[in-house]
Amino acid sequence: MTMPEIDPVPLSDLTTLRTGAAPARMFEARTRDELIETLRDLWAEGEPVLVIGGGSNLFVGDEPFDGAVVRIRTTGIERMPSPRDGYARLRVEAGHDWDALVEHAVAQGLAGIEAMSGIPGTVGAAPVQNVGAYGQEIVQTLVEVDLIDESTGEVSTVPASGLELGFRTSVLKHHYGSVPERSAVILSVTLELAEVGHAARPIQGQQLRSALGLAEGEAVTVAWIRDHVLATRRSKGMVLDDADPDTCSAGSFFQNAIVSASFARTLPDDCPRWPVSPDMDPVLVIPLASFDGYVPAPQGKPSDVKVSAAWLIEHSGLRKGFKLPRSRASLSSKHALALTNRGSATAAEVAELARFIQGRVQAEFGLILQPEPVLVGVDL
């Protein structure tokens, strides 16, 4: 099998933030076998490789990527039985559009991902940063992934627990300023969803009820939830629309900040904050030779606190729609966390705006916001 090489196109055409030049080489894998062989061959050559799904969580620099870009275009959904009564499993190829999967699940009367309607990108990218919205995260339904490791070229099935999924992170996530704990590419994802059918039922999650204006015990269908989540996201410019420049973004550009409880107390009282659940079951190891029958009580410590990055930005004086003079990059007019490309903005312009926002928030509140997208060939 020959590698599926194509003529390179600018990465600005393949990313939702619309920045990036054409790379040296580009490949387009439409089957799992093509993807596996292409990655193995490129890794064996020692060439830098950038893997792209939907391009919705990438911020790419203006200089051409000096290596090979591999576009994952694999698609397909396979329904399988679940060992649990009332559940079904869906095995989905990595290149499948995420929202198309949600639409399919809702049409089949399967619940568990409907609140994540409208999230751009591909299924294979979803576990990498544990995507979530309105109280649902993929960690709640993920069973396992098939992946290929860069170091060995081996394909393996990894249970969800092996990915160490946390808030917008996993062992596969390339965080700004660091490398992933495990360098691998997801080939397929298996989810376990509840077979709820198309009847209305009460919604358990308080966060989802609040977002949709539902009273406790109020019953709605999974299709109703999908429709209303899509409407809510559109109102914030978070559903891709070529006619709306507010959607030319990488979604939330900065992560909500995780700070200590003591630091959180230094912030204004009206800054939205949520406790981060502490480890309630720490492992205590007592050498048997020194064990005297006494087990000390667990030492509790204050939980960390998640604070709203959007609130910090707006209350540092940067309102929705803010832009620097002569720049084609701006904050979204609908959502203070989204940096948008208002028309052929360079990566340098977007980065300049991001650094300005970081500086204002640091000067006002004493913390540095961290970017959420993966940065390729660009620094803040």
Image (spheres, helix red, strand yellow):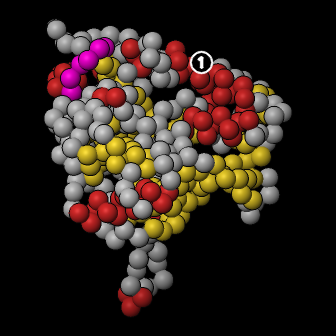
Classified by dominant secondary structure, the portion drawn in magenta counts as: loop
Vertical side of 306 occupied by 245: above or below? above
Disc 1 target residue: 231
Q: Give percent across and percent down for residue 218.
A: 77, 26
Indicate left or right for 155 with 250 as reference: right
Residue at 58%, 39% in the rendered image: 136
For the record, the magenta segment spans: 342-347
Q: Position of residue 290 (x, y in %)?
A: 37, 87
Within 10 Å of disc 1 (Cα), the crowding (few <14, some 14-19, many 20+) is some
Residue farthest front in this picture: 2
Residue in the picture at 69% in, 40% down: 105
Q: Residue at x 31, y 22 (%)?
A: 339
- Looking at the picture, tell me which residue is in the foreground, 356 or 341: 341
Residue at (21%, 27%) from the top-left corner? 347
On the question of residue 139 being in view, the answer is no
Instruction: Tell which of 259 and 377 is nearer to you.
Output: 377
Residue 168: image location, x then y, percent: 42, 43
- In the picture, residue 226 is in which quadrant? top right
Residue 217, image x and y in percent? Answer: 77, 30
